[in-house]
Amino acid sequence: MSFARALKRMPQRQVDPETASVPAPIGGVNARDALAQMPQTDCISAVNCFGTPSYIQIPRNGNQVWATGLIGHVETVMAYNGLTARKLFGVSNNSIYDITAQGAVGAALVSGIGNSRLQHQMFNAGGGNVLVWVNGGVQPQYYDGATWANTTISGTGLTPSNLITATVFKQRMWYIENNSMNVWYSGVSAFQGALTQLPLGQLFKKGGILMQMATWTIDNVSGIDDYAVFITSEGEVAVYKGYDPSAIATWSLVGIFNIGRPIGRRCYTKLASDLVVITADGLTPLSKAMLTDRTQIDAQLTYKIINAVNTDVQLFNANFGWQVIDYPLGNKLILNVPESATVSHQWVMNSVSRTWWRFQAWNAYCWELQQDALYFGENGRVFLADTGVSDAGTAISVDCKPAFSYFNSPGQLKNFLMAQAIFQASAQINPQITLDVDYNDAVNPSPPFLSTGLAPWDTSPWDLTPWGDLSPTLAIKNWQGITGLGYAASGRISLQAKGLIAQWFATNYLYEDGGPL
């Protein structure tokens, strides 16, 4: 008998399926490492979900319409925080509207302001709080809690309508003159009146213009102090200490260093005591940039998503709407990326775990924070963000593709049979699981629509809609049939959710072991 015939007559070994568990990819999006080297706790993509150190929230928080009736793109939202009163303003169609109360806006408070891209700053000049704005097109204005008025700004050689940014530093208001290297500063405890010019062009070697001024709190051997930071369009940064540039004894240059080219006028935010700047290299913390070279890309806050952010910069850097904002109550640092005049997406960092997630369907032009409430401006509307369980009544589409896993046997072929996503949810859900094997990226079919049919307290008319409990206390452990033959696999989770909250903890897989070939 030949060897081949004898092999066929031998009893075949029955293959018993095995199970393996993979944690939810709480490490967030990884757009830096090779797919084969990516930790299984990271994800290749994560749209409209938000990770915590323990689980992934699906979907992300939603939004609700705050103000309607504004004409055109809302390119600025400004918060006025007075001693006893607060106001919120939306700016569109070269006009300022009162959007303090939720609903349709009335007539414009101020019109004909040249453009709607205002840089603004709160200041107290001793007689109460004022909101000051500039836009490089018209005379700067201020709001004192009751009325809007033109500032009475003057300076030798200064055209006040050319002022483009406003910054408070050491009890003075500081302004940058548009398309120049000139800074103008007020007297102590003043935001208007006679300004003094501080020319900085002689400091910088790369040319360009001044883009922004910021204050940076530094703790060193001299103690904690605020420093003045000037950023040019070519990525040079000058740092000064002191308070009065007219007196050498009270004003001195600390140093000049390089960062990537800043993107947009709204290119920085305070993050704790540090300054984070949107640059061509990503989000750059100045505390790291001052000590390293630009080639040390791991100093970027966006290092883990560096390739994705660099692509965004290459494609969309000329578009208006780039902004970074710290949202402490939501544990979020938000980087707004304007893809076009109608579409934006956000890279959102969990400020606790420092992981990154991508939000879509918030087509924001600008952001503002007031009393821990987060707002963004869109076309003709302003939204209250990061609240509720839908996007103004529309389902939120979620798509999350974890890193590929070899299930501790990288050289062994596997026949995948079933998958079980482990959730805690506020309602019964059955999200779609699409299996990708061996680093392929299958076209993801339309995800299922999930809705509880219930509404939380105070969001639906009395006695018309049943109330629902949005506490994620229901354990979801549904097995789904999947097919795939390969060495490594990724179970992609997708759904469209409205009116529910879910927490994704892990995914279990059932598969048959094969040989090495």
Image: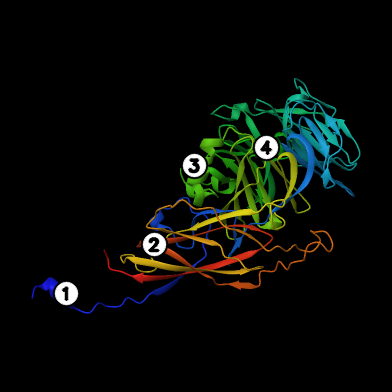
Residue furthest out toward the top: 157
Task: Report the Cα–Cα distance between label 4 and label 3.
Answer: 21 Å
State yes or no: discs 1 and 4 in contact (Cβ < 8 Å): no
| CA distance for labels 1 and 4 | 79 Å
Question: In percent of the image, x 74 and y 47: which residue is there?
Answer: 383
Of the 4 image quadrants, the one containing the C terminus is bottom left
> In this picture, is 157 found above or below 416?
above
The type of residue carrying mark 3 is: Arg
Residue 345 placement (x, y as % from top left): 60, 45
Residue under circle 2? 484
Return the residue at label 1: 7
Check contact, mark 4 vs mark 3: CB within 8 A.
Answer: no
Residue highlighted by disc 4? 213
Residue 402: x and y in percent read 48, 59
Please tell me whether mark 1 or mark 3 is closer to you in this view. Answer: 1
**In the displayed structure image, the side of residue 64 where residue 107 appears, left or right:** right
Q: Are marks 1 and 2 in contact (CB under 8 Å)?
A: no
Which residue is rendered at x = 76% and y = 38% of the image?
A: 120
- Crowding around mark 1 (Cα neighbors within 10 Å: few <14, some 14 to 19, many 20+) is few
Nearer the observer, disc 2 or disc 3? 2
CA distance separating discs 4 and 2: 55 Å
User: Which residue is label 3 attached to?
Assistant: 294
Mark 4 or 2, nearer chain start: 4
- Name the amino acid type tagged 4: Met
Disc 1 element: helix
- Does the image show residue 36? yes
